[in-house]
Image (cartoon, rainbow, N blue to C red):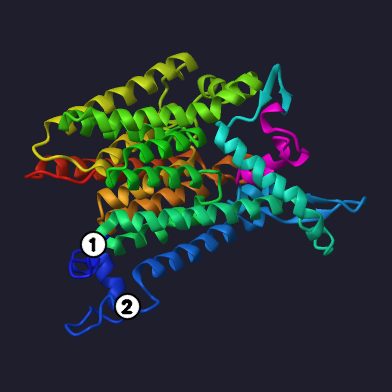
Amino acid sequence: MDSLRTRRSPALTESVARGFVGFLGGPVGRFAAVGRQRWWTPLRVLVLVSLVFLSFGFLAKAPCLGGARAEDGSVFLDWSGNRQYLAACYNDITPLYGGRGLDAGGFPYAFSWVEGDVTRYLEYPVLAGLFQWLVATVTRVTYPLLDATGWAIPEAAWYFALTALAMSALWVLAIRLVADLAGHRIWDVVLVAASPLVIVHAFTNWDIPSITLAVAAMHAASRSRFGLAGLFIGLGTAFKLWPLYLLGAYLVLALRDRRLGPFLRMLGVAAVSWLALNVPVMLAYPAGWREFLRLNSERGYEWTTIYAIIDRNTFLPALPVPALNVVSFGLFAAACLGILVLGLRAQARPRAVELIFLIVVAFLVFNKVWSPQYSLWLLIPAVLALPRWRLLLSWMVVDALVWPLLMWHMLGSNEMGIPSGLLDAALLTRLILLGVMTALVVRQIRARRGSMVES
């Protein structure tokens, strides 16, 4: 917990924050009663700000929640006129409610459909599928009450609203944990709560639960509760793959400290919790369970990756998928090796969040899939590792702009979509900003002197 006496205002060091403070009334005076508020504590302010920006995120997707009544009286989702692209409100949650059989009941990994010559299944890890199934069950039970009102609200839109409500609660929990991790720099958490990325991507996909679990693991590890941290990493990996990479940061610190016991405990609990969730589904629905792995191994690069930029702007032949898998994994592995060397050779012990930031950046940059909402994964590690307001806000704004540019580009030239050059300019700007942030974190690690005790 942070001490009121050592709490630092970002207005003292960050010109952007100084501008906000000036707008709100100027710096705190000598005799101000700091920390004595009975209600508006920093944490409650952060929770309120996060709720406001989550509401903005819901409103950003609202144009894709409208419906219309068919002749038989049923309500269907209305995405006519390429609304999902023109309003940049596309999200995976709404269409996948019916597209993955969640509206029909039954276990999600038992549902299949034929796409071309391939039998498809739900393409999400087990805990994500269970989360979707649980919210879908609540949707089907409660929707008749909503439909009885006569409002033309599609069942898929109600599913989206319930999903957004559940994920909002998890995001507020993440804010609570990040406030603890920020310590005396608690006001830096405003950058998380009020991030433009929250508006754009909080409800694009099911990423928030995995973020909350990853932050919970970081919080537990910072208090030397390594078994609990392993539990959260295992659950997070069962929701989305990326929390697995937190283990890399703690492995670097374990090797540096020559204390493998806590790390092995973390690793063991993570493995057991992941297996406890996955093995039953793996045995009962092997084809459905393998779909996540199959799809990720067979798909090509995504629109906003470095491989797509190269393909759109050079005459080099596109790599076949097997070669692309080798290249992307090889680059990521090389980056992780470099992070290991950096962590072991630094004069002072790096902070875990700095290593986590570097690993997540490496994964995003070199992976063949960078779905735009993946940038949310980097938000909390970036703020905790490098609380430079101007730089972080610049990156967040540019990264948020990638989304509408991508949507407008996906319209296609026949529908007045923007040319790829505008999208690529935003993507290259994002890469430059991430490169600067990475260089600053590396310099921060190398320049530190003395010993660090923080996990």
Residue at coordinates 60% horizontally, 42% vertically from top-left? Answer: 131
Q: Which mark is residue 334?
A: none
**Residue 261 at x, y percent in the picture:** 25, 29
Query: Which residue is at a point 19% across and 68% down the rendered structure image?
Result: 12
**Residue 417 in the image: x percent, y percent?**
58, 44
On whether residue 98 falls in the magenta region, the answer is: yes
Disc 1 target residue:
184
From the image, which quarter does the N terminus lie in?
Answer: bottom left
Q: Is residue 189 above or below residue 107?
A: below
Spot occupied by residue 184 in the image (x, y as percentages of width and height) = 23, 62
Q: Specify the principal SS of the magenta part.
A: helix
Say whether residue 412 is visible.
Answer: no
Q: Nearer the viewer, residue 377 or 32?
A: 32
Residue 350 within the magenta-colored segment of the rendering? no
Name which residue lies at 65% across and 47% down: 135
Residue 298 falls in image quadrant: top right
**Quarter location, residue 285:** top right
Q: CA distance from mark 2 to mark 1?
A: 23 Å
Label 2 residue SS: helix
Q: Say what secondary structure mark 1 lies in.
A: helix
Task: Name the image quarter holding the C terminus.
Answer: top left
Q: Which residues are magenta?
A: 91-110
Taking the spot 44% from the left edge, 53% from the top edge, the residue there is: 197
Whether residue 16 is visible here, answered yes or no, is yes
Tell us which disc is closer to us: 2 or 1: 1
Q: Nearer the viewer, residue 222 or 89?
A: 222
Q: Which residue is mark 2?
A: 23
Q: What amino acid type is highlighted by mark number 1?
A: His
N-term-proximal mark, 2 vs 1: 2
The image shows residue 39, relative to residue 177, as above or below, that is below
Residue 286 image position (x, y, % from top left): 62, 19
